[in-house]
Amino acid sequence: MRKVLDIALTVVLLGAVALVAARFQDDATQTLGGNAIVNDGDTITLGEQKIRLRGIDAPEFTQQCTRNGAAYDCGREARNALRRMVAGGRVSCEGWENDKYDRLLAVCHAGGVNLNKTMVERGWAVSYGDFYSEEDVARRAGEGMWAGSFDRPQYWRRVHGGLAETGHGGGGLSGFFNWLLELFSSMNGQQGESG
């Protein structure tokens, strides 16, 4: 009986590895460039393609935070910070998978600046699978949203009617587990819009 269970487990594991390998082979790297429209603090549009900055989560456009005891529009400020970084120049993005809203998850640069990393360093986005040390530096320095208090964007979306999406790290086991979560969510028919 034990031998049968070992064989069954081996077959299941090999099937899972084959499925994952096929999934990642289908995800060819895309490189896009051009003038960007900044939708919010972590989403841009290049041509017809919406792009979600991979590994970060910025406040939603209508989200408010608190600084010096007063509420302020941190979602708008995050968008404006990204607009300043882009400043009408050429943006180049590279990614290999889309999120459940069909946005390309990508790392983007403008004028030699890594937009994903810089948004976290300046405190206008939080880590969402990558950039943990940059978030820690921004938090300690009181940069951007860290100058006051705020709800993490994922939590804010959940409270305000949107479903929280999974973080999107640079790949490896994190990417595999996020893919599994997305797979099971789609099998359960979960829907919702998020940042």
Image (cartoon, helix red, strand yellow):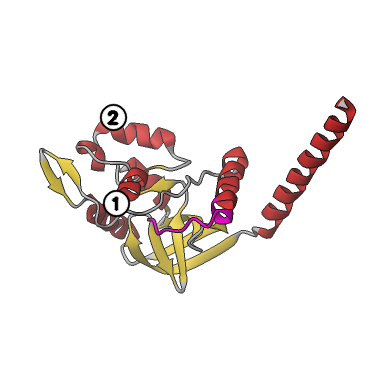
Question: Which is more toward the observer, 63 or 57?
Answer: 63
Residue 148 in sight: yes
Q: Is 187 colored magenta in this rendering?
A: yes
Quadrant for the C terminus in the image = bottom left
| Residue ID for mark 1 | 160
* Mark-to-mark CA distance, 2 and 1: 28 Å
| Viewer-nearest of discs 2 and 1 | 1
Q: Residue furthest bottom?
A: 48
Q: Residue furthest front?
A: 1
Residue 143 in sight: no
Q: Residues within 10 Å of mark 2 (few under 14, many from 20)?
A: few
Q: Residue at x 58, y 44 (%)?
A: 175
| Residue ID for mark 2 | 140
On the rendered structure, is 18 left or right of 98? right
In the rendered image, residue 13, in percent from the top left (x then y), is placed at: 77, 39
In the rendered image, residue 46, in percent from the top left (x then y), is placed at: 44, 69
Q: Residue at x 25, y 37 (%)?
A: 146
Question: Which is more toward the observer, 3 or 1?
Answer: 1
In the rendered image, residue 111, in percent from the top left (x then y), is placed at: 40, 57
Q: Residue at x 34, y 63 (%)?
A: 38
Q: Please state the extent of the stretch shown in magenta in the rendering.
A: 185-195
Amino acid found under the numbered disc labelled 2: Arg
In the rendered image, residue 183, in percent from the top left (x then y), is placed at: 59, 52
